[in-house]
Amino acid sequence: MSNGLLARRGLALAALLLLLAGAMPARANEPMTFKPYVQVDAKPLGPEAANGALIYLHGSVPHSVDMDFDTSRQPAKPVEFPFGFADFGRQMKLDMFVVVRPSAYELPGYNAEIATYVAEQIERLAKQGYRSIYLAGASRGGWLTAETATRSPYLSGMLIAAPGNSALTGPALTAQRDDLARLLSQTRAKRVFVAFFEDDPREAVPRGPAARSALGQAGVPHFVLDRPPDVLGHSAIAYGRFVRRYRECLVEFFTSEPGATASFDCAPGGAYASGADIKFPPYRPSARTPSFATEPLARFIGRWEGDNDGGAYLIFASTEIGERSITLLTGYSPYPHAPVAPWLRELKFMLEKDGVSIRYDAGSRGSMVLKPIADDELALLWQSPNLTSPFRMVLKRRPNDR
């Protein structure tokens, strides 16, 4: 099946599995009677044109959608890459694949067999000529990625986010932390990225320090992102905010030349994270607030920036202030890969009747309202007929802008 990885076709499933697919999950340690098929996520460039290949292992699939396959043995709806991994593949110019697992085999007793199967697919890609191969996984897929990486010598890199493999009780979480550290200490991947997020129930027993220690002892260059601020939840890798803040960090880590046992660290303040695509001009703050400016308007003087879960970014800088109005140079960068261009324009905000908020009124095109919620924070509410729901964001004052 030398071309199977590039043809979006499934491997044969046993007839018995098809008959029992809607009945009950297989029990752990029964022999696997199927092979997960490999789905091409996008039209591949091929091993000569692409810089490599990225294989994604998805999280657990509910049994209610188990075997939602059409007659060609493929799911009716393709499994999508999480935003964070898909963007990495695009930035690195990689062909992208997904190994899809029916949920009947989601029990931990099948981990070894699934990992062995994925390792075989990695070897197939290597023999096809892909010079760099990366394996990524989220949730249970992240755990399977860590297991697979102990078996395959062909991985240029491994990326896992919020890995999970067991119940969420205290003793199980402690065991899971230790088991993950063991797998990471045995990895054969040449570089490893691991992400843990706040508000993930599995972080009730924090795993970042143990993961970092295990990878350091293994002598593997690693980037452990341990519960970064504002990037929250078990599924944080799927949101545009992760891409906005850590796109450049990931690419730098996997393309730089760290030392043999280097622990990589990266602050999310790169060009893309700061809206470089907007081409916002340098900010030159005024030396003092005009004497006629009212206190409510004076609170908005400075430069403010923020992003939201989707990864959109906004920046404001005060340019002119009157008795009842303030003009803000406004830059907007849409969520990653959006079919909308960044824009930059001056908007005149008027002081609201509440004496606290300011509003920009664009007539039929909607309005923006900014309201102080702390000394260095503003809440934005953006309403427009072009938006399916109100756009909300918290903006923070840029450092040294007072």
Image: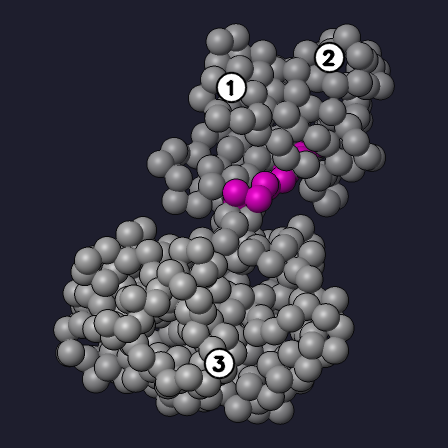
Tell me the kind of residue under disc 3.
Ala
Could you give the CA–CA distance between mark 1 and mark 2, rounded to whole angstroms? 20 Å
What's the magenta region? 302-311
Measure how far apart labels 1 and 3 are at the Cα level. Answer: 52 Å
Front in this rendered view, residue 110 or 397: 110
Quadrant of image for the C terminus: top right
Q: Quadrant for residue 211, please give it.
A: bottom right
Which amino acid type corresponds to the residue marked 2 in the rendered image?
A: Leu
Seen in the picture, residue 159 relative to 233 is either above or below; the reply is below
Q: Is residue 76 magenta?
A: no
Look at the numbered disc 2 and give the secondary structure of its residue.
Answer: strand
Picture layout, residue 160 above or below residue 70: below
Q: Residue at x 34, y 67 (%)?
A: 20
Q: Which mark is residue 28?
A: 3
The residue identified by callout 1 is 384
Q: Is residue 187 left or right of residue 401?
A: left
